[in-house]
Each structure stands twice: as structure tokens, then as C-alpha cells.
Image: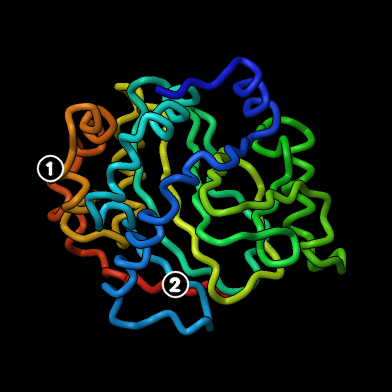
């Protein structure tokens, strides 16, 4: 089982992200094949005019589900989140054009992370992820000031690509891990960038179950009968169930709780 060093943990705590170059390089071929096997499920095909996203994503294929169990992926997650971390879902994407500066959340009670796996070689000129190191610390003055700037880009008359940032060049097989609170963006990309993510978090405390239930319901419009996909549940090992059971425990009446919600198609557009 992979375990992060004290230096790696300090880096993540300080800057809010970390890159693992070549971590899954040996698995790139089968991961790409599985990625390409999922998207034909869409009735409407990616035409490059907007982002195309599938949620949940790895849950659609048993072999992709096995990434949650992989000792490299699980080892990183356990190092950052604890032995009993929660798997909170995934999304698979064909990206088009720019993605403006944003945070994926503003979590103070627990750490939420995203593991991003890119299937194409990217740099600052063609859509690589950009991050603002340190902006994951919500109560830090720098993080607060960065949020004001990101909300005021239009008024400042500058392009998002001109903001100071770390560009995370990637090659197939690299894994990027970042805190949901971290500001990130992408500029200059083509209409065919392939990427999927795993979303993970620290286990919710016993007195936070209502918050977990609200989180699940907030994302329910992306789901089917269950928060997780059938392949994720049906192929779950005993080890994986540790990372599914807390969400699963509040999803017994998931279909009933969400039957009034409109179901969005898997195709989600972002300019």
C-alpha cells in the first residue's frame, strides 16, 4: 500500500495539491480503453461544442471501479483522509475550451479531495490544469483575497489565464490530487480533452449525518436509483465496502427521497 511521506503531506497541507507523475503509466492503455467504452452509453455524442460529462463515471465499468481499491490510489487517499475515507463519486469528461477559475467546494468540517486522471498530454498552451497554491485555506487572508479577485476578473479587465498560477503539465498516467477548496482553472484547451476524476472525503462524524444526507440529495439529479452505479456496488470487495458503507447507509430510501427530482441527461454543458 502506497503511503505518503511527511514531506508530501506537508506539501499538500501547504499548497492544496500534489502531482504524482507516471503513477498509472503502466495502466494507461486499459484505462483509456475503459474510458472509451463508457461514452457510447450517451444517446447524444460529444460534438465539441460544450463539455460532455457522465456522472457517476467509473461506476459504469467494473475494471474502472477497481481503481478505488488500487493500493496506489487507496494509499494516497488513506494518507490524506484516513483509513475509512469515503468514496463520493466520479465524473468522466470530454472538455471543450476554457474552464474559469472556481472552487469545487468550501469545506471546513472535513477534507474533500479530487483525484484527476488525464488521458492526453497537456501543458499551459492546450488546457492543462492551473491551480492557485494555498487558496484551499478558506480562513487564510490570501485565500479570501484570491476569491475576491477571481470574482472580479471581468471588472479588472484581465483574462483568467493571466492570473498568477501553477500550471500542472500532464502526460498520460499522471495523477493530480487537489483539495476541493483550491481555486483551479484551465485555458486554451481543445474540444477533445479527456479526463475523469475520483472524489473522496474524510468520513462524516456521527453528528454530521444530516449534512451527508444533504450532500447526497444535492447531487441526486445526476444519479439513477442509487448514488453509486451498479458496477461499483456489485463488484465491491470487503475493503471497498469500507469506503462505500457510510453513503450507502443513508441511501436505503434514496429512490423515494429523490423521485420528485428531475433527472438531468448525462450530457452537461459548460461554455
**Residue 67 vs residue 17, the one in the foreground:** 67
Disc on res. 178? none
Q: Position of residue 262 (x, y in %)?
A: 27, 69
Q: Residue at x 48, y 20 (%)?
A: 3
Dot 2 or dot 1: first in sequence order is: 2
Q: Position of residue 257 (x, y in %)?
A: 18, 53
Q: Nearer the viewer, mark 2 or mark 1?
A: 2
**Disc 2: CA contacts within 10 A as few (<14), some (14-19) or many (>=20):** many
Q: Position of residue 244 (x, y in %)?
A: 25, 35
**Residue 38 vs residue 221, the one in the foreground:** 38
| Quadrant (top left, top right, bottom left, bottom right) of the C terminus | bottom right
Q: Residue at x 21, y 32 (%)?
A: 241
Q: For this view, does 11 lie left or right of residue 118?
A: right
| Quadrant (top left, top right, bottom left, bottom right) of the N terminus | top left
Gap in angstroms between the C-alphas marked 2 and 1: 30 Å
Q: In the rendered image, which residue does mark 1 sit on? A: 252
> Which quadrant of the structure image shows residue 206?
top left
Q: Residue at x 42, y 44 (%)?
A: 199
Element at label 1: loop
**Residue 167 vs residue 180, the one in the foreground:** 167
Element at label 2: strand
Q: For this view, does 176 lie left or right of residue 64?
A: right
Q: Residue at x 72, y 48 (%)?
A: 147
Q: Position of residue 200 (x, y in %)?
A: 41, 38
Confirm or deny contact between disc 2 and disc 1 (CB under 8 A): no
**Disc 1: CA contacts within 10 A as few (<14), some (14-19) or many (>=20):** few
> Which quadrant of the structure image shows residue 99?
bottom right
Q: For this view, does 205 lie left or right of residue 257?
A: right
Q: In the rendered image, which residue does mark 2 sit on? A: 52
Amino acid at each position: 500500500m502506497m503511503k505518503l511521506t511527511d514531506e508530501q503531506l506537508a506539501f499538500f497541507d501547504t499548497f492544496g495539491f500534489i502531482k504524482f507523475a507516471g503513477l498509472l503509466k503502466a495502466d494507461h492503455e486499459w484505462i483509456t480503453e475503459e474510458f472509451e467504452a463508457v461514452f457510447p452509453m450517451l444517446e447524444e455524442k460529444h460534438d465539441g461544442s460544450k463539455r460532455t460529462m457522465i456522472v457517476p463515471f467509473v461506476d459504469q465499468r467494473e475494471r474502472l471501479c477497481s481503481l478505488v481499491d488500487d493500493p496506489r490510489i487507496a494509499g494516497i487517499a488513506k494518507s490524506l483522509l484516513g483509513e475509512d475515507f469515503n468514496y463520493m463519486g466520479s465524473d468522466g469528461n470530454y472538455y471543450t475550451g476554457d474552464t474559469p477559475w472556481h472552487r469545487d467546494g468550501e469545506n471546513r468540517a472535513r477534507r474533500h479531495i479530487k483525484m484527476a486522471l488525464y488521458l492526453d498530454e497537456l501543458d499551459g498552451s492546450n488546457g492543462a490544469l492551473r491551480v492557485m497554491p494555498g487558496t484551499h485555506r478558506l480562513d487564510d487572508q490570501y485565500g479570501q483575497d484570491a476569491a475576491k479577485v477571481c470574482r472580479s476578473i471581468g471588472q479588472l479587465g484581465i483574462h483568467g489565464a493571466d492570473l498568477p498560477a501553477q500550471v500542472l503539465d500532464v502526460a498520460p498516467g499522471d495523477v493530480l490530487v487537489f483539495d476541493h477548496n483550491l481555486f483551479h482553472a484551465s485555458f486554451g484547451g481543445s474540444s477533445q480533452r479527456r479526463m475523469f476524476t475520483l472524489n473522496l472525503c474524510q468520513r462524516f462524524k456521527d453528528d454530521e449525518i444530516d449534512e451527508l444526507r444533504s450532500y447526497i440529495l444535492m447531487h441526486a439529479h445526476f444519479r439513477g436509483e442509487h448514488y453509486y452505479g451498479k458496477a461499483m456496488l456489485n463488484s465491491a470487495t470487503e475493503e471497498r465496502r469500507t469506503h462505500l458503507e457510510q453513503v450507502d447507509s443513508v441511501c436505503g430510501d434514496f429512490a423515494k427521497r429523490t423521485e420528485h427530482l428531475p433527472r438531468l441527461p448525462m450530457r452537461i454543458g459548460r461554455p
